[in-house]
Amino acid sequence: MKVPSINICRLCLIFALGSILCACNSSRFEAAFLEGSQIRLQVGQVDQFVYNPQVCQLAYSFTNCTFCAHNDSMSDYFLVRFDRTPDALGQRVSADIEWTTRDNIQKKNNVTLEVGKIEGDKVWLWSQSARIGLTVRILE
């Protein structure tokens, strides 16, 4: 059976437009994430953890390149193990991320994150492929 060439062109056009729209949505999510000021973990469009200084703690280990934000009882947290300390705009780092949800603990390994913003000791990182955003503090 011969497929008319016009249908193949239409399919290619639809695929190209879909790719452009997905890239635009990801960029929009990243831009919105970078505008936030709170220490947090965002997966997709959902904040999985937002730091509240009244009931939460922060920790960073330079030796292990590990950041943790958690509530006082450790029932709600996110933990990030970087391959190196994120400290330069545009820098790409790899990380293993673990966080709590309402029902269980989620893990995502070998996530490539890019530093999108730095203000003082606060660093914003975004993974376009995983659609994960992290805002952490590099504490001394």
Image: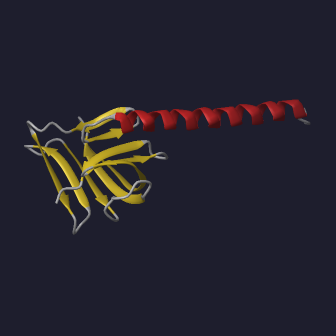
Tell me where residue 27 appears, x and y as whole percent.
Answer: 50, 37
In depth, the one of 20 and 6 nearer the eye is 20
> Which of the 4 quarters of the picture holds residue 65?
bottom left
- Residue 25 in the figure: left or right of residue 13: left
Quadrant assignment, res 139: bottom left
Quarter of image, res 32: top left
Left/right of residue 120 with respect to residue 27 in the rendered view: left
Quadrant placement of the N terminus: top right
Measuring 25% from the left and 50% from the top, which residue is drawn there? 120
Residue at the spot x=24%, y=52% of the render?
A: 121
Residue sitting nearer the eye, 13 or 34: 34
Q: Foreground: 106 or 130?
A: 130
Residue 77 coordinates in the image, percent (x, y): 20, 45
What's the image's color scheme?
Answer: secondary structure
- Residue at position x 41%, y 53% from top? 113
- Residue situated furthest front in the rendering: 120
Instruction: Tell me residue 94's x, y (percent).
Output: 39, 60
Q: Locate residue 10, reporting x and y percent.
A: 79, 30
In the rendered view, tell whether residue 37 sits above or below residue 138. above
Count numbered badges in the picture.
Answer: 0
In the rendered view, tell whether residue 126 sits above or below residue 4.
Answer: below
Residue furthest bottom in the image: 63
Residue 133 vs residue 15, the one in the foreground: 133
Tell me the quadrant of the picture where the C terminus can be found: bottom left
